[in-house]
Amino acid sequence: MNNRVMQDDKLKVVTLPLEKLTEIAYAFEQWSKIVCVMLMAELKRIHQSTLAKDKALLVQSGSYSQITPTSKFSIQEATVDDIRLAFEEKRLTSKQLVEMYLESISKLNPLLHAVIETNPDALIQAEIADRERELKDDATKLPVLHGVPVLLKDSISTKDRLNTTAGSLALLGSVVAQDAGVVKRLREHGAVILGKASLSEWAHFRSFSIPNGWSARGLQGKNPYVLSADPCGSSSGSAISVAANLVAVSIGTETDGSILCPASQNSVVGIKPSVGLTSRAGVVPISLRQDTVGTVSDAVHLLDAIVGYDHLDEATKTASEFIPKGGYKQFLKASGLKGKRLGIVMEHSRLDQHIKTLRREGAIVIDNLTIPNIEAIGDGEATALLAEFKTSLNVYLQELVNSPVRSLADVIAFNDKFAEKEKVKEWGQEVFLAAEATNGMGEKEKAALQKMEELSRDGIEKLMKEKELDAIVALGSTLSSVLAIGGYPGINVPAGYDTEGVPFGITFGGLRFSEPKLIEIAYGFEQATLIRKPPKFTTLRHLQISHSHIKPTSTLSIEEATVDDIRLAFEEKRLTSKQLVELYLESISKLNPMLHAVIETNPDALIQAEIADKERELKDAATELPILHGVPVLLKDSISSKDKLNTTAGSLALLGSVVARDAGVVKRLRESGAVILGKASLSEWAYFRSNSIPNGWSARGLQGKNPYVLSADTGGSSSGSAISVAANLVAVSLGTETDGSILSPASHNSVVGIKPSVGLTSRAGVVPISLRQDTVGPICRTVSDAVHLLDAIVGYDPLDEATKAASEFIPEGGYRQFLKPNGLKGKRLGIVMEHSHLDQHIKTLRRDGAIVIDNLKIPNMEVIMDWTKSGEETALLAEFKISLNEYLQELVKSPVRSLADEKVKEWGQEVFLAAEATNGMGEKERAALHKMEELSRNGIEKLMKENKLDAIVTLGKTLSPVLATGGYPGITVPAGYDSEGVPFGITFGGLRFSEPKLIEIAYGFEQATLIRKPPKFTT
């Protein structure tokens, strides 16, 4: 059939194929929408121009200001509410959002195979949405999904330039007659159709051998958490895309487990609605009795948009009567678990902790329940589905405007013809063949349907009514068949990650049209746990370094690369900051699962690096830039950063808290152009929660590992900062110290640590223990790197009073001038606390010109070293409570506001309890402070003055209490490895503000020995 187009008076007839004419008509439709919107915008502009003078006067008077972006919007974990708010505040346009998602897809999809194709008209749709928003007097009145991109499973029809193929090459080029019912509703809500998500081919109904997530068109979808793990299916691409932040919301379909299972495996939320609540018209079918269209993530907003009556799907008529007035979002209640009766079926150890949570949040939990005849539920399902599939698919194919195949038999023949591309030899198509052998709904099939109805009625329905349950609860998608055969709804919510990092979920299922209760329960659980975390690779660490105009003449290895190496590579255009960040992110992705050195990486690190690269390009001489410009830095997770990174001191209690501003040292790093790479792990609460907690362990970061000997002590509390640098996950990092927390991990991990004099670096914005003892310092592989970092972070900060006096001691020209290879010459060094490991080094010190006085003793040393006797414990407990409560109160948002709010876990919290029992700085505490001052004055200070010492020398962190109680500086440098290969360091300590001398000594020793070697596994 052809259509004719008459060309004016020439009466020339142009013959066009129907498909081409359809394409032209669609393009014209989109063009006309834009023209119409532009005309409306012009009319509005003319109307508003009369207000221009008045507005100008208001601007001059300061009572009116144009809206400008206050922060760059990130798609990382962005919710529909985040997007909508950004639209309303004019920080984001729909077009910009679509562009960001398309960029993310272009980078990650070659790895994940989550998206089969993107919509060539997505940007046009986004521009229309932006115009509509401009013309709306109150943008808040637009539908929630207006301008929001949505991905559709590739079995959901769209009447546009996208294909609908169920992942099969057999349907490539087919033309649907109209949008699927759910797509019509999405368009009515102003959503942008971003593209089609991959799936298990033919919704995993071609063969049982086909892996979850594979299709001939989409190839093998990958689980973004563990690439080798099962992504599940069949709505795999819909779940992967949302999990990996390729889109905020997507739509899947389910016959049996096809939403719940991939949601569980990819740590996202999936809603399988009651059958009939959402239209299946225009969806490649399996069974109209079991098929349903559901949502993945931001699920309730999307559900509200797609439910409702569709005259093309008879089941929606009855179901639509159960849609609550006002929609489903009214059931998003944080207290949704309160009073709900929940039945636990199919017990699993992974549910144990969650059952406690459910009860704690007010749910009545009845466990050890069994659904009658559960083992027989799947028996009749296959019989019915095979016949239903053939019947339904043949109807669907016949209704297509254009299609290479018109029946299931045609599809089977196509697969045989193109067996190589469809991998028929590998995966087969036995389910297709079994379905093709059926002859409609005969006696056998009808008997199977009746049996399933009985099993549902006498199974889940009977159980729930007898126990008066609001929902049944199970791990993952284990109950999907129970929910499937009865057309019951279910919601899956992220519930955890196994030892390999593979996600699993918890499913709440109910009787038909019980969505309101299920949403309350699921939302209540989600808000009580907040378990979901994005897959780590979404920081782009798996990606190849992007091409640039810079042609590297030689490859820079991050292995042992110093700041000076990096800076030279920047200047010679052999390296960009973006490339360097990508190298470190890749290294973190490979080693961190073993080391647990990094708690989280910065989703904006690559953006910061690109900015640094642009600044370098525009600078006449790159050498004029600060030394740390474009260099990645890791921060201990107790150092605040006002960005997308958390600051939690390793504790789950602070997860989700929002700081008011960058820490003082972070402000200085940003001013130096450094890239904040992420947060390093630590001993939880800087090792001040319990003496039982192992060094390097925290609830968020798990157990940090020594990269030299995995079973060895990591030192603490700045363990992650030291491990990361030692293992070449970064060149430079920041730690904090109250007593030994920089010097100890530096010694144990064969790196350099500088503990500055108290007040030399700002503690503002750092989770505190004691303002009298706390200090922030560098942890790096070399003394020179540590000094470069020290130069960047020292200085006065009005938010830290101690920095005012200390800043007067910062030498003009900074500390790097003291990096002298002959720095040991003439220095008087005192050896305290002898150790055989030091014998050879004492010879080296003397050989390089130092005057070494050994066998020295600090008066009252045994008292100083015991914090219970010195007064340190008494003072710190009171100081910690005061300082921490003040820090918590100043947070913009926080789950906890005082020391009393922290929860007890495995290791206890006796230090917390002791601190909470204090009542400020009373007589006892003041006496302790006075005692420590006397011990310092009559101890190390007297010893050093009497012997005219430039520094005291000791093994590792053995003197850390001496340096801590007096606020004195110290530098640890790698000094060797014991018989097991465990590193140890040498520490040079001095009086307050003696950093110049200590740097000369430490650098001189380092250059004379060059002991450090990288851990073997990093090669």
Image (spheres, rainbow, N blue to C red):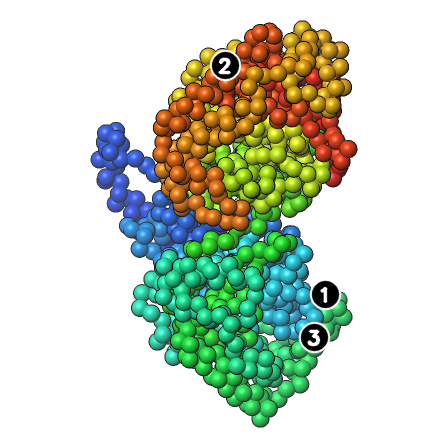
Q: CA distance from mark 2 to mark 3?
A: 85 Å
**Disc 1 to disc 3, how far (Cα)?**
13 Å
The residue wearing badge 1 is 421
What secondary structure is found at the residue carrying circle 2?
helix
Whole-angstrom CA distance, mark 1 to mark 2, is 81 Å
The residue singled out by tag 3 in the image is: 429
Does residue 1014 appear to the left or right of 177 in the view shown?
right
Q: Are marks 1 and 3 in contact (CB under 8 Å)?
A: no
Give me the disc on residue 937. 2
Residue 928: give x, y in percent of width and height.
Answer: 44, 24
Closer to viewer: mark 1 or mark 3: 3
Q: Is residue 978 visible?
A: yes
| Quadrant location of the N terminus in the rendered image | bottom right
Q: Residue furthest bottom?
A: 443
- The crowd level at tag 3 (other Cα within 10 Å; few <14, some 14-19, many 20+) is many
Q: Secondary structure at mark 1?
A: helix
- At a point 36% along the width and 26% down the height, the residue shown is 923
Amino acid type at mark 3: Gln
Pick whichever of labels 2 and 3 is earlier in the sequence.
3
Quadrant for residue 547, please give it: top right
Residue at the spot x=70%, y=75% of the render?
Answer: 429
Badge 2 local density, few (<14 within 10 Å), some, or many (20+)?
A: few
For this rendering, which residue is in front, 641 or 763? 763
**Which mark is nearer the camera, 2 or 3?**
2
Return the mark for residue 192: none
Mark 1 or mark 2: whose residue is earlier in sequence: 1
Tell me, yes or no, if residue 567 can be seen here.
no
Determine whether label 2 and label 3 are within 8 Å by CB: no
Mark 1: give few (<14), some (14-19) or many (20+) Cα within 10 Å: some
